[in-house]
Amino acid sequence: MFTDNPFSGLAATVPPAAMQGFVTAMIFLVAGGTLFDLWHKGSALYFFATRRAAAKKRTRQISSGAAASIAMKTVLVDWLASGEFCTLRRRLAHLVTMYGFLAYAIATVLLVFLYPTPDTPAPAILPVLWHVGALMICIGGYWFWFFIRVDVVAEGNSPFRVMRADLFVLSLTASATLALIWSWLESAESSWSNLFLGLYLAATLVLFGSVAWSKFSHMFYKPAAAWQKRLEDAGGSRNNLPAPADKPAAFGAPPRHARNY
């Protein structure tokens, strides 16, 4: 199963052009949904307005070398290592899911566009990447959903309580899970494969079609926000949070929690 290209077997009933058209449509849904999200929420206007305000309040000049170093740190720490997460478990779950999704998505594009039929056998590594990527999504997604979510772990809510904010992780995990089940049924030549193919496509359509309402688009502009934050810190213009207060003793008053003792 892990070494079989499921899309080449599908070519017997579905034309490669149809598969390629579906993948292309998903790419356009991601691009369009992200642009709509930026426009609807005003994230782009807020980002550039904040950047202009920070530039005016900058107290230190940032050299080209420092700017390059900041960009490198943003890529290595904030993007590739998900440095914004405070807890190790949350970071690991995010990284497993993120790298699994990248492997899964890239392998899907290559398999569908370059090796869609049995006449064009794919390199052995690509089906492995596709299956391992989907498996990593499942591991990271289910780990987060059942054991890491704040409303489940800290607030004691049911893990089956679903909100709109959960749309991204649920549709992503469902798509990867159904992809693995469909691939297994396809390799076993089961009559159930067509049913799970339909479910897989439906979950994938929800995943990419709901970009404007889910957290999918965050993966595109979070690195830009992290880069801007580092620039503000380096330039001394960080002003969206109040400065840390001095100790109460400095004002001649005991700490608030000690006043009643």
Image (tube, rainbow, N blue to C red):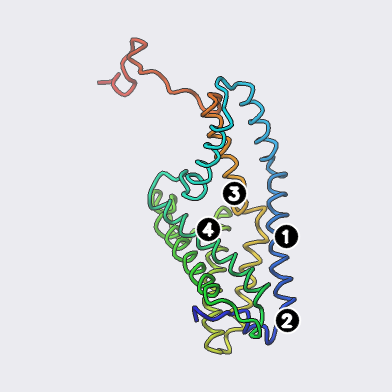
Which circle's residue, 2 or 1, is located before the other in the chain? 2
Which circle's residue, 4 or 3, is located before the other in the chain? 4
Q: Which amino acid does label 4 sit on?
A: Val
Residue 259 placement, left or right of 185: left
Q: Nearer the viewer, mark 1 or mark 4?
A: 1
Q: Which mark is residue 28?
A: 1
The residue carrying mark 2 is: 15
Callouts 2 and 4 close, C-beta under 8 Å:
no
**Point 70% across, 55% down: residue:** 31
Q: How far apart are marks 2 and 3 (CA)?
A: 34 Å
The residue carrying mark 4 is: 162
Q: What residue type is labelled 1?
A: Phe
Which circle's residue, 1 or 4, is located before the other in the chain? 1
Residue 76 placement, left or right of 105: left
Q: How far apart are marks 2 and 4 (CA)?
A: 37 Å
Q: What is the x, y in percent for residue 158?
A: 43, 58
Q: What residue type is labelled 2?
A: Pro
Tell me the crowding category of disc 3: few under 14, some 14 to 19, or many 20 or more residues within 10 angstroms, Cα based. Answer: some
Determine the secondary structure under disc 3. helix
Q: Distance between the residues labelled 1 and 4?
A: 27 Å
Q: What residue type is labelled 3?
A: His
Tell me the crowding category of disc 4: few under 14, some 14 to 19, or many 20 or more residues within 10 angstroms, Cα based. Answer: few
What quarter of the picture does the C terminus occupy? top left
The residue carrying mark 3 is: 218
**In this picture, is 117 found above or below 91?**
below
Which circle's residue, 2 or 4, is located before the other in the chain? 2
Q: What is the x, y in percent for residue 42?
A: 69, 40
Q: How far apart are marks 2 and 1 (CA)?
A: 20 Å
